[in-house]
Every structure is written in structure tokens, then in C-alpha cells.
Amino acid sequence: MAIRRWPVLVASVLPADFADLGGQVQQLEKAGVDRIQWDVMDGRFVPNLTFGPDVIAATRDLVELGFEAHLMVEAPDPMLDRWVAAGCELIIVHAEASTHLHRTLGRIHELGARAGVALNPATPLSAVEHVLDLVDLLLVMTVNPGFGGQSYLASMAPKIAEARALIDRRGLDIELEVDGGIGVETIGDAARAGATVFCAGSALFPGAGPAGMAERVAALRTAATEAVPA
Ligand code: DX5
């Protein structure tokens, strides 16, 4: 179910304390984020390895928040059902990892989940223009995927704006998400370009400074709202 308010704040658990993932997702819910992003990595599509469906399932009943699985994997199709069964309501595949993207997006819908597609920084918007009727969320990566704590790529702003214009021109109900290097200094740039969903990891966790998680969530909301006059 798409969240209607703006901005939608999604917490990446990539920088979380992996020894206490259950407690961390509960803390994120308490702090006021709108959704949790599980950064699934297979060590091949990206040079990192993270969570399987059983890890996600272990935390599912601890919070009410929606879960999105960001599949940074070479072969997303064989395990689509596993991510849905683990409790993810939104499955995001990479256009670069999907030989048959139209079929994959349709399969995600058959499984009862919403379908998202992610674009790496070098991938043009044209890679998804013929499947937008099957897309519930478009994720424009603002870093090269694989790790948290990277710097926001301001060069992605034109692609975000182009995606915004395309979605609006076609009158589509598609969430436009950005992910990578999102913090109080950068969220405004992405918001002005037309993003509606903001995935943040490092900016939410203790390494970002003394403030508490709720303060950080509020600061991100304020920075986004102030950047885009009503
Ligand atoms: C990239 C990851 C990160 C993560 C958030 O592969 O997907 O973008 O979600 O990382 P931060 O917010 O720390 O840049």
C-alpha cells in the first residue's frame, strides 16, 4: 500500500547493528520512519553480502512498518516468492539485473507485492520507459550500490527530474525514491528534483552524531519540506 504523505522516509538497515536487528527496526519505527529497506546483496551484483529472507522474516512481526526488499542481486527471479513470504510488501529489482524485466515485474504482482525497479547511476531512464505500467516504485540510485556511507551523487538530479516529468506526464501513480548519501545536506536537492521517497541509512544511525534517531528523522523531514515550497 503506497504511503500518501510527503516526504516518505525509508530507513535502510545497512548501517544498523546486525547483532540486534530486531531492536533496531523497533527503534526505527519508534523514531517515526515510514518504511524499512532491506538492502539485499549477493556479493556478485555488488561487492557485498547481506541479508537472506529468513533474517528479514525474523523481524517481520516486531513492527507494523512496511518492508521493502532492495534486491542488489544478479538473479532476482528465483527467490521472488521468498522475499514476499518473508514479509516484504514491496520488491525492488535492478533493471540491470533483469533480462526479462517486464516478466519479473508481472511476477512480483502475481505474488501479491508491489513492484519496484532500481536504476544504477549510469543507467538511463529509457531502460524502464516501456514497463512503467507495471511499476509501483522507481528507485533512482544516488550512489553506486554496495555500501552505505557514500557521498550523494548530485549529478543524478537531472535523472530524478526527468523521472518526475515522465511520471507526471503519463499521470502514473509511481513512487519516486532516491537512495544513497541522503542526509540533511542532500535531501533538499533530491526533493527539488522531484523525489517523493527518501531512503537514508547512515544519516539515521548513531555514527551521524549525538542526536537521537527521532531527531534525525524529524530533521530529514524538515530539510525536505523546507526545500520544496508548498
Ligand atoms: C547502497 C545502499 C545504501 C543504503 C543507504 O547500496 O542501498 O544506499 O541503502 O546508505 P546511506 O544512506 O548510508 O548512503
Image (tube, rainbow, N blue to C red):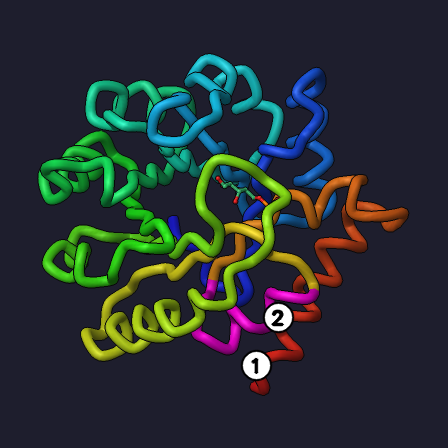
Percent across and percent down for residue 20 are 71, 19
Residue at mark 2: C-beta within 8 A of ligand 1: no
Q: Is residue 73 magenta?
A: no
Judge whether 60 appears above or below 161 on screen. above
The residue nearer to you, when weighing 71 against 218, is 71
Determine whether 115 is above or below 159 in the image: above
The quadrant where ligand 1 appears is top right
How many numbered markers are drawn? 2
Residue denoted by label 1? 228
Residue positioned 23% across, 45% down in the render: 95
Query: What residue is rendered at 22% in x and 30% in y?
Result: 111
Q: In the structure shown, which secondary structural element does the residue marked by tag 1 occupy?
A: loop
Toward which corner of the image does residue 216 lie, by quadrant? Answer: bottom right
User: Within 10 angstroms of label 1, few (less than 14), some, or many (20 or more) residues?
Assistant: some
* Residue marked by disc 2: 224
Q: Residue furthest bottom?
A: 229
Tell me which amino acid carries mark 2. Answer: Ala
Dot 1 amino acid type: Val
Q: Position of residue 38 (x, y in %)?
A: 49, 32
Q: Is residue 228 left or right of residue 3?
A: right
Q: CB of mark 1 within 8 Å of CB of mark 2?
A: yes
Mark 2 nearby-residue class (10 Å; few <14, some 14–19, many ≥20): many
Residue at the outermost right position: 210
The answer to whether residue 126 is above or below residue 149 is below
104 left or right of 68?
Answer: left
* Position in image of residue 139 (x %, y %): 37, 53
Locate residue 35, reporting x and y percent: 53, 44
Of 64 and 71, the residue lying toward us: 71
Q: Which residues are magenta?
A: 185-196
Above or below residue 141? Residue 173 is below
Q: Choose between 24 and 47: the one closer to the eye.
A: 47
Residue at left offset 55%, top offset 73%:
189
